[in-house]
Image (cartoon, helix red, strand yellow):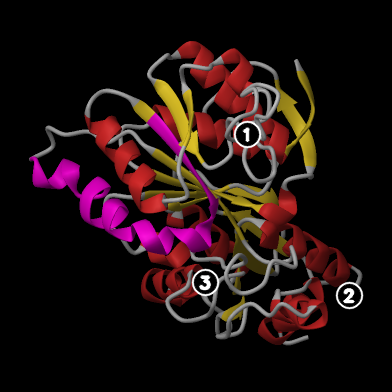
Amino acid sequence: MARKLSIKDAINEALDQEMARDSTVIMMGEDIVGGAGAAGEDDAWGGVLGVSKGLYAKYPNQMMDTPLSESAYVGAAIGAATCGLRPIAELMFIDFMGVCLDQIFNQGAKFRYMFGGKAETPVVIRAMCGAGFRAAAQHSQMLTPIFTHIPGLKVVCASNAYDAKGLLIQSIRDNDPVIFLEHKSLYGLETEVPEEPYAIPFAESNVVREGSDVTIVTYGLMVHHSIAAADILKKEGIDVEIIDLRTLSPIDMDTVFESVEQTGRLVCVDEANPRCSIASDVSANVAQTAFKYLKAPIGMVTAPHTPVPFTPALEDLYIPSPEKIASVVREVVGA
């Protein structure tokens, strides 16, 4: 049976069901259990925004608070994954992955290759990402391209609660390292979610809106901004197709190629900075493989090449808006 859940609650349910199903699924992170000197269950925050709230009471032997040292506990999670466990390491923000990049891209991402396919590293690294939370430059970045660049990592960024639950279950059951990103501005968004466990395969994008004039390819928060832009453009007679990538590595380019073959136009929307972004990656793939179908130059909408501002007015300008997306679509369509 399906009922409406927020993305935050859908992630909590996925964690709950997977820890109940498999005792090797463990979770570690900062403030997910409790503070020093307090009763653990009563003081179990469930992380900085309470995503895992209530799970410690059910699985006290599968959840562990860690010191404020991402390099230490991400390294511990990767090591535990090579020894038969299925750890989930929660980082408060994607911005903090800088202190544990060696553990991620020089160790976890490479073990399967370095040991001739004999080593598996089933670890999930969860982190909040994205702007719009008034959290300033060091807590608001969309660093997805850093991780899609690294062979051996899988990268997920869901736009709704249904996808968040199914993709997290898939990530936990996968035998390779997965970077699972949760846009903090979407945590409260509700969608119909089945009660039973289900897994959504990687590299299967979702056509969230069909159209004939132009294809928008995007992910995360920008799916919703693109839908809002499509509503604006529909009133002007422009029919927009929107593809939610869901997983960024591996990436489903076949669906993109098929859509561009039908519409003849492409706009890539990405909250990341423009250089070497998901938008530029998709654009390059289409230009290389599906150029003959294009009726116009490819459009891209990204954040500017600056740090995320703290000032609310500037942060709002920094994030690609529905109006900005609609403007670029008009240019591509020639309207």
Distance of label 3 from label 1 (alpha carbons): 26 Å
- Range drawn in magenta: 87-115
**Tag 1 secondary structure:** helix
Q: Nearer the viewer, mark 2 or mark 3?
A: 3
Residue at image x 37%, y 69%? 289
Residue type, label 1: Ile
For label 2, count other residues whose C-alpha is less than 10 Å away and answer few (under 14), some (14-19) or many (20+): few
Image height of 156 relative to 326, above or below:
above
Q: State the image quarter where residue 203 is shown.
A: top left
Q: Where is mark 3, residue-wise? A: 279
Split into 4 quadrants, where in the image is the C terminus?
A: bottom right
- Nearest to the observer: residue 203 or residue 113: 113
Can the viewer see residue 163 in this picture? Answer: yes
State left or right for residue 262 relative to residue 191.
left
Q: State the image quarter where residue 213 is shown.
A: bottom right
Question: Do tag 2 and tag 3 residues touch (Cβ < 8 Å)?
Answer: no
